[in-house]
Image (cartoon, rainbow, N blue to C red):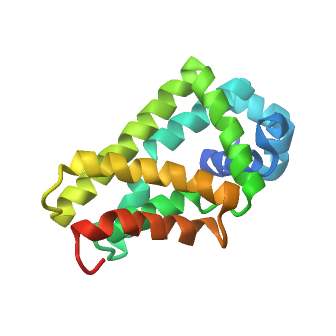
């Protein structure tokens, strides 16, 4: 016997998780809040994911596995390797439009760092991100520097630029981040 088809996909639920984290932080991340945003009921989420923890682990698993798609989308749209690198990193931060939203995501990071099951997925996501940065730098033909070392530097700038924007940056996060990534890459490829 088959059940009723799902009216809301897992991806839509995970988008609701991401939006709830950004808007309400970990304290506001409840099954009820996610269900309301996704157009479901809390029992429907519990039936699908088992618990709030099960939902968070499923979300973390999906996030860790979705890194390649972000960069692949940029390449498919015709971006050069370094444009794809920069634009992909900016895309990861696109949902964050306010300092409060970034603070809420950073508060959620604390949970990722202190819960071993969630940390496992954060580590996978971080390593996948750096691997894709390395691949794009290698593809761009950057000379005179180890692509993995430059990728590590770009990754550090990506993380640090988010914090400096939150503390005293101006304008929107995306352009702020893009300018700093371009600064790091510019000496390696004239004309960027």
Give how far across and how far down residue 143 sits, in percent: 13, 61
Image height of 38 relative to 186, above or below: above
Q: Which residue occupies the extreme bottom position in the image? A: 191
Give residue 186's quadrant in the image.
bottom left
Which residue is located at x 68 percent, y 45 percent?
105
Q: Nearer the viewer, residue 98 or 118?
A: 98
* Res 73 seen here: no
Specify whether 49 is left or right of 61.
right
Which residue is located at x 60 percent, y 55 percent?
164
Give residue 70's quadrant in the image.
bottom left
Which residue is located at x 52 percent, y 34 percent?
61
Image height of 40 relative to 49, above or below: below
Q: Which residue occupies the extreme front position in the image? A: 168
Give how far across and how far down residue 34 sits, in percent: 79, 43
Q: Which of 103 and 10 is in front in this view?
A: 103
Give how far across and how far down residue 171 sits, in percent: 66, 73
Specify whether 31 is left or right of 85.
right
* Res 27 seen here: yes
Specify whether 141 is left or right of 7.
left
Give how far across and how far down residue 116 sits, in percent: 56, 18
Q: Which residue occupies the extreme top position in the image? A: 116
In the rendered image, the quadrant that contains the N terminus is top right
Which residue is located at x 59 percent, y 33 percent?
58
Specify whether 17 is left or right of 121.
right
In the rendered image, the quadrant that contains the C terminus is bottom left
Q: How many marks?
A: 0
Image height of 34 relative to 183, above or below: above
């Amino acid at each position: 016997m088959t059940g009723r088809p799902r009216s809301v996909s897992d991806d839509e639920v995970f988008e609701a998780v991401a939006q709830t984290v950004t808007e309400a932080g970990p304290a506001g991340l409840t099954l009820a809040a996610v269900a309301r945003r996704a157009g479901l009921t809390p029992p429907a989420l519990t039936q699908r994911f088992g618990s709030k923890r099960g939902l968070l682990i499923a979300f973390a698993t999906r996030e860790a596995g979705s890194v390649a798609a972000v960069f692949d989308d940029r390449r498919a749209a015709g971006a050069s390797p370094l444009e794809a690198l920069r634009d992909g990193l900016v895309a990861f931060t696109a949902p964050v439009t306010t300092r409060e939203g970034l603070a809420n995501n950073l508060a959620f990071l604390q949970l990722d760092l202190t819960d071993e099951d969630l940390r496992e997925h954060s580590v996978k996501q971080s390593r996948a991100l750096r691997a894709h940065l390395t691949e794009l730098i290698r593809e761009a033909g950057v000379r005179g520097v180890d692509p993995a070392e430059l990728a590590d530097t770009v990754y550090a700038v990506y993380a640090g630029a988010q914090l400096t924007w939150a503390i005293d940056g101006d304008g929107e996060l995306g352009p702020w981040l893009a300018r700093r990534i371009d600064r790091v890459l510019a000496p390696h490829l004239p004309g960027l």
